[in-house]
Image: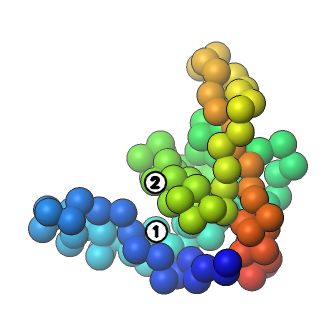
Amino acid sequence: MMHDLFDVEVPRQRHSATSTASAKAEAPRFKGNLVRVLTAFAKTTEGMTDDFGQRALGMTGNTYRPLRVKLENLGLVLKTTATRKTQAGRHAAVYVITMNGRLEASRYE
């Protein structure tokens, strides 16, 4: 199933007016970053940990993680059972792009 990543709702706390206002203001950047993260997954054959993705894209965890979670919820990225050490030496889950994710990423090349 194809998605228009520029039509994806930005995560927010629906009960919070400030969260809703923040999500609305962040929408253009969030949607562009969603494409950046997806295409980064498409370029790697070994998948990425959140730590690796954050460093590769120059994003903080608070920016990167919601993007990866949204891609995961859309079925474009999948958590594997593999782990890899982070820069801090801890084990972290490895995420890979799905076939649907590859199809979606090809729309933004």
Whether residue 56 is visible: no
Q: Where is residue 88 in the image (x, y as percent from the top left)?
A: 59, 19
Say whether disc 2 or disc 1 marks the residue closer to the N-terminus: 1
Name above or below for residue 94 compared with residue 58.
above
Q: Which mark is residue 66?
A: 2
Q: Is residue 39 left or right of residue 50?
A: right
Q: Do the residues labelled 2 and 1 touch (CB within 8 Å)?
A: yes
- Identify which residue is drawn at 46% across, 54% down: 66
Q: Check disc 2 and give the amino acid type.
A: Pro
x then y, percent, for residue 81: 71, 32
Element marked by disc 1: helix
Would residue 27 appear left or right of 101 to someone viewing this image? left
Q: How far apart in space, not on screen, are marks 2 and 1 (Cα)?
A: 9 Å
Mark in front: 2 vs 1: 2
- Quadrant of res 54: top right
**Residue at x 61% of width, y 79% of height:** 3
Write the residue at 74% across / 69% down: 100
